[in-house]
Amino acid sequence: MTATDAAPAAERPRPPPFDRWVALVLLSVAMFGNYYVYDTIAPVADLLTSQLGFNDEQIGLLYSTYSWAAVIVLLAGGVVIDRFGTARSILVFGAICTVAGVVTAVSPDFRVMAAGRFLLGIGAEPLIVAVTTAIAKWFKGKELSFAFGLNLTIARLGSVAADNSPTWAHRFYTGWQPPLQVGAVLGATCIVSGVLYWMLEGRVSRRYQLGAAGGTDKLVFRDLFDFGKSYWYVVALCLAFYSAIFPFRSFAIKFFMDARGVTREGAGALNSVLPLAAMFATPLFGLLADRIGHRARLMAIGSATLIPVYLLMVYTAIPLWIVIAFMGIAFSLIPAVMWPSVAYLVPERRLGTAYALMTLVQQVGLAGMNWLVGFTNDAAHASGANPAGYRPGMWIFTTLGFLGLLFSWLLYRSERGPSGHGLEAVR
């Protein structure tokens, strides 16, 4: 045993830069696989309909089952991660995500496919929490914000790759199953990266001292009664905003093909604009908010930008790329301001509860809205032969945009009053 090995943990040096950046890449690749598997359904939605007889309600339920599983995990409160550590948790939850991708692709039976999506929700959400916790351990005090930004960029490349799979994996789009099998293979990066990360952390932790990451976000129900109305306006905005964005993405490729005659490749490219724009624009909008303040006002601007886009797609012939560009602005602006704003509104000791509650509310909204939009599309007989059938669903999204604007305005009014928390100030 060397002197370094025998040194107390507190006296050990921090890991060298090479090990830290290797850890970041492995952690980010695990999330890449998770994001890719989640977004594999949208590019094959029309094939599930034409070849397996799935209706839009069932397609929506494939996303809803993920969200319900995520709610169950969030209620568990991160106990597994706290008890078993990040390395073991990433390995276990990465394995669950990998199995989920396989189960989703293995059978044409809707119940089996839904079971795979449920498994993905069980594994994916705690995997994201474990990865976030691990990054904090490696980078706390050393490029932490940059590391988080790079992690999210690599993860979102999973969504971009899935949306564009009809282009780069065109030869696999001969039926519903081969694209999902490609997703299962890429989803295996979750467990492969998990194994490699587990080996890396085990080796490094014997010689170096990893930083303390703090506890994972947990719901502490007694804390909920201490949050002010500004926080609840932000939660309501979170619910309205994400319920308008992600369920739209669930059906967007099918909608673009049916209602606007776009090719599968073109529809996938259009759908990928949102995560692609967010990769680059979200940090810039965050810097803007830090520089000028006016956070509630910026969230209102983002909400207002979202309102007309859905109706423009079904009632006008305006080029889709223009409409999607406006969606990209809202998708980048609102999250860049909304999530950091919570730190202004809630005491630091309750931030874990505040973020866990926001995420739980978000997932409940996604579960309900994915089902509702699918049900509405079926009730209106939305299809390539009846593009007008998509209009009721688009009105639902538009209504959510108006609700987001309302909650943003209420937040702005609250923060301009004597009980404001400084969201409109430069801090």
Image: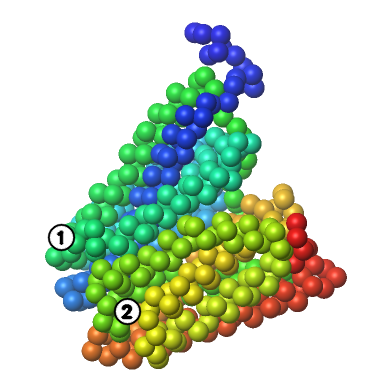
Q: At which x and y percent is residue 386?
A: 27, 90
Q: Residue at x 53, y 52 (%)?
A: 76
Seen from the viewer's position, the closer of residues 60 and 154 is 154
Total count of labels = 2
Check disc 1 and report its element: helix, strand or loop: helix
Q: Residue at x 61, y 79 (%)?
A: 405
Q: Residue at x 42, y 51 (%)?
A: 155
Name the residue at the right extreme: 418
Q: At which x and y percent is residue 223?
A: 70, 57
Crowd class of label 2 (few under 14; some 14 to 19; many from 20; radius 10 Å): many
> Callout 1, which amino acid?
Arg
Seen from the viewer's position, the closer of residues 397 and 365 is 397
> Callout 2, which amino acid?
Phe
Q: Which residue is mark 1?
A: 171
Q: Which mark lies nearer to you, 1 or 2?
A: 1
Q: Is 427 placed above or below 28 here? A: below
Crowd class of label 1 (few under 14; some 14 to 19; many from 20; radius 10 Å): few
Q: Is residue 122 visible?
A: no
Q: Is residue 165 left or right of residue 417?
A: left
Seen from the viewer's position, the closer of residues 239 and 298 is 298
Question: Can you tell which quarter of the image residue 234 is in?
Answer: bottom right
Q: At which x and y percent is residue 351?
A: 67, 53
The C terminus lies in quadrant: bottom right
Which colour scheme appears in the figure?
Answer: rainbow
**Distance (Cα) linking label 1 and label 2:** 22 Å
Q: Which residue is mark 2?
A: 255
